[in-house]
Amino acid sequence: MASSAREKDGFREAVLRLYRTTAFRLSAVYLLIFVAFAIFVLGYLAWNTRRLLDAQITETINTEINALAEQSRIGGQRRLVNIIERRSRQSGSFLYLLVDQKGDAVTGNAVLRAPVLSLRPGWTELVYSRPDENEEARRLAKIRVFVLDSGHRLIVGRDLEERAVLRESVRRARGWSLLMVLALGAFGAWFVTRRVLGRLDAIALSSGRIMEGNLSERLPVSDNNDEFDRLAVHLNQMLDRIGGLMAGLRELSDNVAHDLRTPLTRMRNGVEESLRKASTLEESREGLEKAIDEADQLIRIFDALLMISRAEAGNLTLATQSLDVREAVSGIAELYEPLAEEAGAVIETEIPADLRVAANRELLGRALSNLIDNALKYGKPASGAAGRIVLSAHAAGDRIEIAVADQGDGIPESERQRVLERFVRLDPSRAKPGFGLGLSLVAAVARMMGGALRLEDNAPGLRAVLVLPAALVDDPRDVRE
Amino acid sequence: MAGPMKILVVEDDDEAGRYLQRALGESGHVADLAADGEAGLEMALSGQYDVLIVDRMLPRRDGLSLIMALRAEKRTTPVLILSALGQVDDRVLGLRAGGDDYLTKPYAFTECLARVEALARRQNPQSAQLSYRVADLELDRLAHRVTRGGEEILLQPREFRLLEYLMRHAGQVVTRTMLLENVWDYHFDPQTNVIDVHVSRLRGKIDRKSGAQLLHTVRGAGYMIRDNGK
């Protein structure tokens, strides 16, 4: 008993599980719709055919009665009886009956099961039999009762066997077609389950493996280029991007570890040394001041890294405003002009008036100051002549390009992408001050304002181009402070 | 130099708070300490402080909300916001809430002190005068004229603004970032000595002929214009 109950439970479980699968539900709905549609079509056909048949029968009976009534008017009762007798003998599905006032049959080929006098003039469907048949024969007919001028009743009808045959054939067709529909539905269900949901299952399986840590795995893509392939391709692209971000993060933390460790070590060594060696107050002061300088450098690196990672996280919520490019750029140029002079370089600006960029003044200033800083550091002409740093700008479609060009060694094309990465320094000796964050910081800042940084050859030298969105002409923010 | 100031430090980190309190005391000021936003607001509302130093992230009531509540009570006590959040928009948010200046942690104490003193001076109605005078150096804001010992010195517009800012804060230390912020209106950290070059140019113009040096470099902090004779 217990085991059978358990079996029943197990069975119920299995049915429930089946019921819960999308495949089952989809096929059930599919089947239901199919069947409903088939029933509707068949029903409509049958109903329409029957209506047509009925109309035809009515039409022929009317014609017959009119003809007979006409004959009776022309030739009287005798002629009518003759005609009816003649027609009754012909085999066919018409039935005739002429009844006198008392209800007795005068002539005809039908025996009615109902008292004739109770029939009202007009249309009826009733059971009849042929006079030569036995009592059991029952046929259905549609008749019309017509009262003649003489008071006799003329009944003309037509056997409805045809209609019954039709109905029977429709019923058979319904059975067959339902069977067909069920077979088709089952096939559809099989197709959906095996082909379509199978693909989904494959995707689910792969993503499960990816979640378990196998991050290099990708979802299967067939050659069909259908919805599932598009989904899988998109998911794969997403995985690639995530992988890239994670690789970037890993690289960043490696680099942070390395590049923060170096100055941290330097700082620690310095402090230790002054602790050990400093005999005078002045000497220990010096050591402490150096330590503070090193700490400040560390904070700068840290801030730059934060900014870069924020830009990379795609958090572009920063408000931009419409800025006059000439004003913004020459402000920075003017800030750096004395420094450039001291370094034996000149800063020139070539910027047309009425150029407006949608940017954040602060960030644009930071980006430009980094680029000028770079140009001052690395942009000295190899000949030793005074360097020329040219700041220029022009509109390019809906973008504004602001360029900082120097005449130094430039950056070889193969390295241009790489220098935008964090902590990449082309100077292998790392002799010049800097952390290799400058250009990647500028690129990050540009990205935060919806723009980009492009590096070009200035032949000779480097041309760093900030590509930023142009300000809309009727920007409501376009008001000078 | 302005006399001793009464300063309220609202900082939840006990060590950082006591450090500020001690350092401000050593600089000749009196500092009180509040450890959370509610206590800080209550003390600030008593109105006895010249400047408030408010940390942005505080227990019970955060720094920005403290400042907004204070401003809602029509108190104009200058506020220096200290924050570990140093992104461009964080700063804008802080100033919009009613803060007067913003300093990102970690900071140099000299920077903090210079800013606090500048804020207190800003409250002083005498601060925006029509002309400034330090020893024999005179700056006329209306005529845009600078003279030293009666002799006119020609300055570029930016140099004029630089000198104006320094003279308005005569006797006070002005840091490089304060100069970049107030003269150039940029709030980033110039990684090179851009400001130093500007100041030394200015010094060349105003201190060249006369013997007495007025524009001094304060080691490890910034610059100060000061009459040595006084």
Image (cartoon, coloured by chain):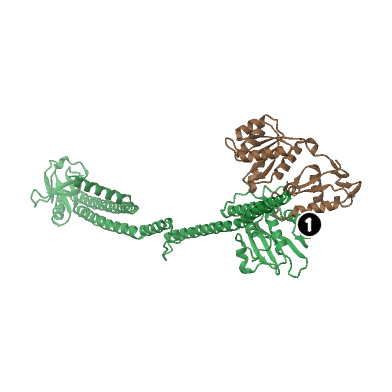
Q: Nearer the viewer, residue A399 or A380?
A: A380
Q: Which residue is mark 1?
A: A338
Inspect the image, locate mark 1, and give the three-letter code of the amino acid beneath it: Pro
Find the residue positioned furthest to the right: B150
The image shows a total of numbered marks equal to 1
Asked if residue B99 can be seen in this view, the reply is no
Q: Position of residue B18 (x, y in %)?
A: 64, 38
Q: Nearer the viewer, residue A310 or B168?
A: B168
Q: In the picture, residue A451 is in which quadrant?
A: bottom right
Q: In the picture, residue B6 is in which quadrant?
A: top right
What color is chain A drawn in?
green
Relative to A214, does residue B230 appear above or below in the rendering? above
Q: Position of residue A219 (x, y in %)?
A: 43, 61
Q: Position of residue A96 (x, y in %)?
A: 16, 50
Q: Which chain is brown?
A: B
Residue shown at the point (43%, 55%) measured from the top left: A211
Q: Is residue A225 left or right of residue B25?
A: left
Asked if residue A269 can be seen in this view, the reply is yes
Relative to A470, does residue A458 appear above or below in the rendering? below
Q: Is residue A202 left or right of residue A108?
A: right
Q: Nearer the viewer, residue B173 or A199?
A: B173
Q: Position of residue A441 (x, y in %)?
A: 63, 56
Q: Nearer the viewer, residue A188 or A442?
A: A442
Find the residue positioned furthest to the top: B46
Relative to A414, does residue B21 appear above or below in the rendering? above
Chain identifier of the residue bearing label 1 in the image: A
Residue shown at the point (71%, 45%) measured from the top left: B111
Q: Residues within 10 Å of mark 1 (few under 14, many from 20)?
A: many
